[in-house]
Amino acid sequence: MTINLKNLSIFQVVMLSFILSVLMPLATSNALEGEPAPLTKELAEENLEPFAGAYKEVTQIHNAYEQKIIESSEQSQVDVLQQEANDKMSKAVTNRGLTIEDYNKIFKIILNDPALKEEFKTVLNRMP
């Protein structure tokens, strides 16, 4: 499968880079270990506050790097900026006590559960 990066939004490029550099190795290692990775609503409910904080910080990091990446004319500079953003986003997640895998699970759970999505929005709006 070939992805034409020129047709993707900068957010999609940054998130694709994040997924490929951080999440894929984690998914591969868990698959090799044979650990089940069920999506549970309990996981999301128990970690809604830390997830909301991480989500807010990841979004801020994305926004801070988006324009820099767009304005960069050299691919090497884009690569450096994407790696910096990925590192900061990963740290934002782990500093909240979540693994990258759990962060992504919670994100999927919230997307698929309207009631939990509303609860998440409420928690997010309460944050400074």
Image (cartoon, rainbow, N blue to C red):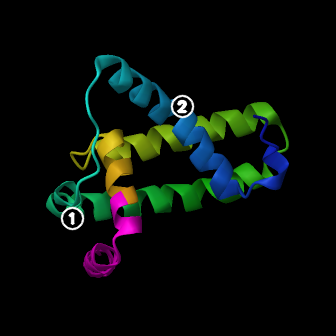
Q: Is residue 114 visible?
A: yes
- Residue 21: mark: 2
* Residue at the image position 69 percent from the left and 52 percent from the top: 68
Dot 1: within a 10 Å radius of its alpha carbon, few (fewer than 14), some, or many (20 or more) residues? some
Whether residue 84 is visible: no
Q: Is residue 80 left or right of residue 45?
A: right
Circles 1 and 2, Cβ within 8 Å, touching? The answer is: no
Q: Secondary structure at mark 1?
A: helix
- The x, y position of residue 22, in whole percent, is 47, 33
Question: The N terminus appears in which quarter of the rendering?
Answer: top right
Q: In which quadrant is the C terminus drawn?
A: bottom left
- Would you say the magenta stretch is mainly helix, strand or loop? helix
- Image: 80 above or below 45: above
Q: Residues within 10 Å of mark 2 (few under 14, many from 20)?
A: some
Q: In this picture, is 113 found above or below 100?
A: below
The residue drawn where x is 82% and y is 54% is 7
Query: At which x and y percent is residue 115?
Result: 28, 79
Tag 1 residue: 49
- Range of magenta residues: 109-128
Q: Residue at x 79, y 36 (%)?
A: 2
Amino acid carrying label 1: it is Glu
